[in-house]
Amino acid sequence: MKKIFLSILLIALCMPIMAKKNNDNRVVMIMVDGLRWQELFAGADSANLNNKRFVSDIPANQKLFWRNTPEERRKALFPFIWGEVSKMGVLYGNRLKGSMMNVANGMHFSYPGYNETTTGYPDDKNINSNDAFPNPNISILEAANNDPRYQGKVMVFGSWDRFHDIFNQERSKLPVNAGWDTSKNPNETAAEKNYDEIEKDLPRLWGEVRYDVFSFEYALEAMKSCHPILTFVGFGETDDFAHMGKYGHYLDSANRFDRLMKALWEYTQSDPFYKGKTTFIVTCDHGRGNTENGWKDHGSKIPGADQTWFIAFGNQVKDKGEVAGGTQLYNKQVAFTVAKLLDIDFKNTEGNKEEPIDLK
């Protein structure tokens, strides 16, 4: 009897260890800079769409993105999200239905938003500008890369050059391909070499932000050749076109984000390494104002700039669709949501844990 008890005890003690060793989840984390919840849940804004100050070719944009109802408009703008994701995943942040999500930091712009979302810590003391400086806080991606199960299987791709600092590339040892970087893939493919050459010769609209398609293509090629378990992709065009007051371009970039995300999802469903094992976690770093001129900008003085949203779909996500009402959510919970999916004992800079966002 004593031997049987000891055997059962040994099995019980080994179970957590076995669970950690056998975690077979993969995560693709996508962030879209400054994409408003208003467009995500209601489609194109008529006040902006019909304003010559913001749209150079109003008829062409109306044909692409204007429909009679908010539900039709959002599907025209985000066909993958509202045609497929809404049927297999969960969407939070439609304030018209009482679903609230905000950043917890007081800055309401990019670096603080990315820091909060990836580290679980709204660090207003240290992260209060968009200047280039190494992030003192440890992200869930760095924590994953420090875990023997995921070491060398975490990769970062982003359109904004600042991701080198946000993820503290030097300290974290994460491979960060951002801004106008060429491929950093140790298994560089022929396609990536081609993208390298195109990127070098392409006229640059912004010095620190490359076009989102390059961030997508580098991420996709790396997923094919390196099979990272945790992949971060940061799209940036939406924020930069909004700051320029180009609403038509902002909509076009939002639509492109939807299309590129669909391509990443479809790839994961075609590769046995990812199929049935991958969760997509999608959000933004901040909101924008909701007035005629306020939509272009964000920051602590812009009402609505703290309003964000969250989408999850794939493995371990219940098909709840668009959530109405419910608990107030914050971007600081996202890092802990990823940690739960990958079974990582993650704590923020203060040594605390936040409640993961409910995916089921």
Image: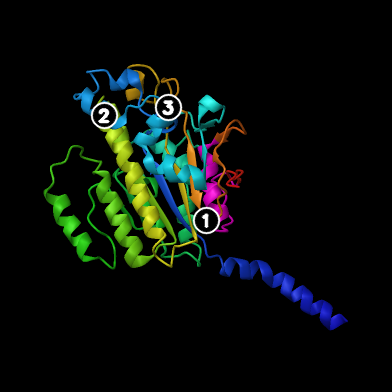
> Is 353 drawn above or below residue 304 in the view shown?
below
The residue that label 3 is drawn on is 70
**Residue under the image location 77 percent in, 79 percent down:** 7
> In this orientation, which residue lies closer to the viewer: 193 or 85?
85
Q: Which residues are magenta?
A: 330-351
**Residue under the image location 61 percent in, 43 percent down:** 355
- Disc 2 is placed on an element classified as helix
Q: Earlier in the sequence, mark 2 or mark 1?
A: 2
Q: Quadrant of residue 129?
A: top left
Residue farthest to the front?
68
> In this orientation, which residue lies closer to the viewer: 55 or 117?
55
The residue that label 1 is drawn on is 315
**Residue under the image location 32 percent in, 24 percent down:** 296
Residue 203 belongs to magenta span: no
Percent of width and height locating residue 228: 40, 62
Q: Earlier in the sequence, mark 3 or mark 1?
A: 3
- Callout 1: few (<14), some (14-19), or many (20+) C-alpha neighbours within 10 Å? many
> Is 88 drawn above or below residue 75 in the view shown?
below
Q: Amino acid at mark 3?
A: Pro
